[in-house]
Amino acid sequence: MSENSKKAILGSAAMLFFLSLLNKGLGFIKSMVIASSFGANLQTDAYYVAEGLMQNALLPISEALAVSFLPIYVGARAKDQKDAKVLTSRTMTDIFLLAFVLSGILYALAPLILKIMLPSYAPDEVEMSVSYFRILIWGMCFYMSNQLLQSLLNAEKQYGYSSFTAMLNNLILTAAVFFLGKRYGLWTMAAAVVFSYVAQYLFLQVKSRKYGNLTWKYGFRDSRIRKLCMQAFPIFFGNAICELNNLVDRSLLSGMEEGSVTAVSYASVLYQFASNLISIPMTTIIYTELAESFAGGRREEGGAKLEKGIHISLFFCIPISLFVMISASLIVQITYGRGAFDAEAVRMTTQGLTYYGLCFLAYCINALLFRACYSLDDTVLPMKVGLGTVSLNIVLSIMLSKFMGLRGIVLATAIANSLTTVITMTIFNRTKLTIHLRSFIRPVLEIAFSAIVATAACAAWLMYAPAANGILRFVVAAFIEFGIYAILVLLCRNETGLEIVSLLWSVVKRKL
């Protein structure tokens, strides 16, 4: 892969990283407002179970269709731009119709599903969760369309719009809870989620209208859409199995101490804040790059791009993971520790976040490997690997939760994700593309050494620094962790670190 290609990938990743950081900052504010307004109690547990069920229904289908659509669209666009627009319009119409039908089915089945999910809840508590779910589910039509439109814009290398829609979501939910939360409670959140999906759809449709829009002509007879469905099914099945694991986790948490579901949900928000800063830029950019390389028959180039994505993930994930684990208590206290979010809620959320820290690297690399499989038109391998790993996750969650409570559930997720990465890497390397694993030995040693030294210094600061101002302690801790890490990786002459410095220097020279 040429130096220009490396810089282009790194530059796009840096742009998306900045947008993701801004978006996650807004997400932090949203979480702080929600936690302060509603705390962690039985009512919030009922809401987050309903929201989790909605995500369980949305994510497997939406991601499967969006991921499968991108390489098919790239291939169609390479042949005929107008025909690619026809394909997009028909696909959008089909997805909207599918989502509408599924929304109606889930609306009707909600009482039965939630009764099974929440065996320890009283009937009125289950009914509360059903009510929230029946509001949330009507955003499904727009959410699924939003995922497709984001995939379309990513295929056109217009990466920033996905981040903007996420910002829009955070702003809408924060404003709704801040101004209406005290008066209408969690009903405000449920309604605001649906409104947010509609607003995002309108924005994305305007930005992508020249590539496709809703039409009266559905495309079920289009052979490419049938191919899309065939490729999407294994992804959907694998995602559905993963969501089944989340359902099991929530069911186990609902039988623990009050507020456990909410605590793990808030810990997951913080975990996703950090992990998505790396995984979203890398998977978004690398997937598009891989689809283009493999569509053009340039497999060696695609392999080089995948290796570059893994190098960048290692560079960022290892220090972030260590930093989150040692500063989890401080992060939770700063973010949520006010208002209705009491000391017990802080304690439970800290436990969840500490163990989520073990998931970062596996999550990011696994996402890259799965995208590489999808771009090679193999959607079966990720499904098979995911099925076995999720089965292990469920077993471990049940076993470990008996001894470790909510910590055991999150630890089971970390173990399963790590195992998935090892298995996927091994099979991919043998059957798809050769990943030059030896080329990772030196970078990993450089990164691990630098991160461990930086984390030791950061831990010493957190242990002995004055506890008067939590925000100041956190800011100084972050500077110590990532400042020392940056210095050490540059002294080790780590390739990714040097490329980042070169990229920053080129930007500065252009400004001058």
Image (tube, helix red, strand yellow):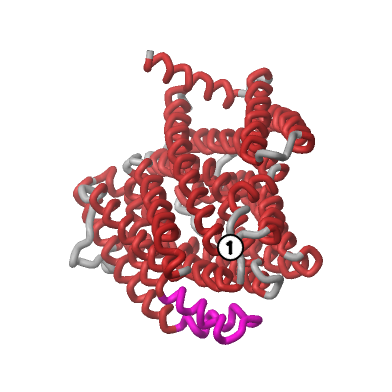
Judging depth in this view, the residue of 39 and 485 nearest the camera is 39
How many other residues sit within 10 Å of disc 1, few (<14), some (14-19) or many (≥20)?
many
Report the side of 13 relative to 248 (left or right).
left
Classified by dominant secondary structure, the portion drawn in magenta counts as helix
Image-quadrant location for residue 481? top right
Q: Which residue ends up furthest to the bottom in the rendered image?
A: 123
Quadrant position of the C terminus in the picture: top left
Image location (x, y in percent) of residue 370: 53, 51
Would you place residue 329 above or below residue 56 in this image? above
Would you place residue 35 above or below residue 324 in this image? below
Image location (x, y in percent) of residue 158: 33, 41
Please say whether residue 111 is one of the residues in the magenta stretch: yes
Report the side of 251 relative to 220 (left or right).
right
Image location (x, y in percent) of residue 4: 43, 23
Q: Which residue is mark 1?
A: 39
* Magenta segment: 109-134
Would you place residue 451 above or below residue 411 in this image? above
Report the side of 416 relative to 72 (left or right).
right
Residue drawn at x 40%, y 48% as measured from the top left: 167
Report the side of 369 relative to 230 (left or right).
right
Residue drawn at x 64%, y 63% as measured from the top left: 390
Would you place residue 132 above or below residue 378 in this image? below
Is residue 288 among the parts visible in the rendering?
yes
Residue drawn at x 53%, y 23% as measured from the top left: 499
Is residue 231 among the parts visible in the rendering?
no
Image-quadrant location for residue 484? top right
Please say whether residue 215 is one of the residues in the magenta stretch: no
Judging depth in this view, the residue of 324 and 489 nearest the camera is 324
Image location (x, y in percent) of residue 426: 65, 47
Q: Which residue ends up furthest to the right in the rendered image?
A: 403
* Element under disc 1: loop
Q: Amino acid at mark 1?
A: Gly
